[in-house]
Image: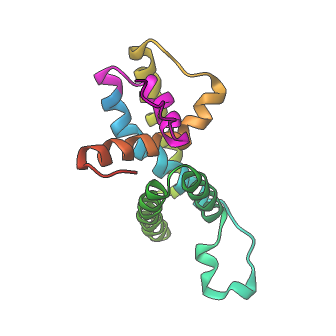
Amino acid sequence: MKKPKIEKRPVDLVIEEYESFHQKPANRVLNYICIPLIMFSIVGFVWSIPFPQLKFLGSYIAFLNWGSFLIAFSVYYYMRLSPMLSYILLLILFVIVYIVIQLQTASKAGGYLVPQVCVFLFAMANVAQFIGYRLEGRKPTFSNEFKFMLTAPMWLLSLVLKKLGVKY
């Protein structure tokens, strides 16, 4: 008797594609470090881009900016693939935004400017990822690189959830 072929979910296909570029242990370790840094740097940089001051928003203006639109788009993308992953990633994004807001407060008191910190982190983490691709011997295409920026956090989170035995 033939077993029925089980179709893979879209989230599994996306994660498997990302996984195929991350087989070697050294590349994987680099990604474990770089993915959170890249996520933080993108959210922090976009959060820092000036947003029009809309008076009717009052004190909520601090939370409506280009970063909040980026987060909404990202969570929508994740939700379409896996609601469980989207909920967890939304919580992670809330933590990132909290840290960014704390850094912005510190920068007003004379600390480093958040966009500069984010650009530096992004550049360093991407250099490390390119080293990882070199170690892997396989580099994604330019168009895949942008898709992988959204896929990478899902991949990393899926590894954690698999270790914990949680279905996503």
Taking 125 as reference, is 43 left or right? Answer: right
Outermost residue toward the left? 164
Q: Quadrant of residue 102?
A: bottom left
Residue at position x 31%, y 48% in the image: 161
Taking 100 as reference, is 147 left or right? Answer: right
Residue 107 placed where, x, y %? 47, 65
Residue 58 placed where, x, y %? 66, 88
Q: How many marks?
A: 0
Q: Which residues are magenta?
A: 1-27
Residue at position x 43%, y 24% in the image: 2
Of the pair 20 and 136, the residue shown nearer to us: 20
Residue 21 placed where, x, y %? 45, 23
Q: Is residue 27 above or below residue 91?
A: above
Residue at position x 55%, y 49% in the image: 81
Taking 13 as reference, is 132 left or right? Answer: left
Outermost residue toward the top? 137
Q: Is residue 26 above or below residue 152?
A: above
**Residue 157 can be seen in this image:** yes
Of the pair 23 and 31, the residue shown nearer to us: 23
Residue at position x 51%, y 42% in the image: 11
Q: Quadrant of residue 92?
A: bottom left
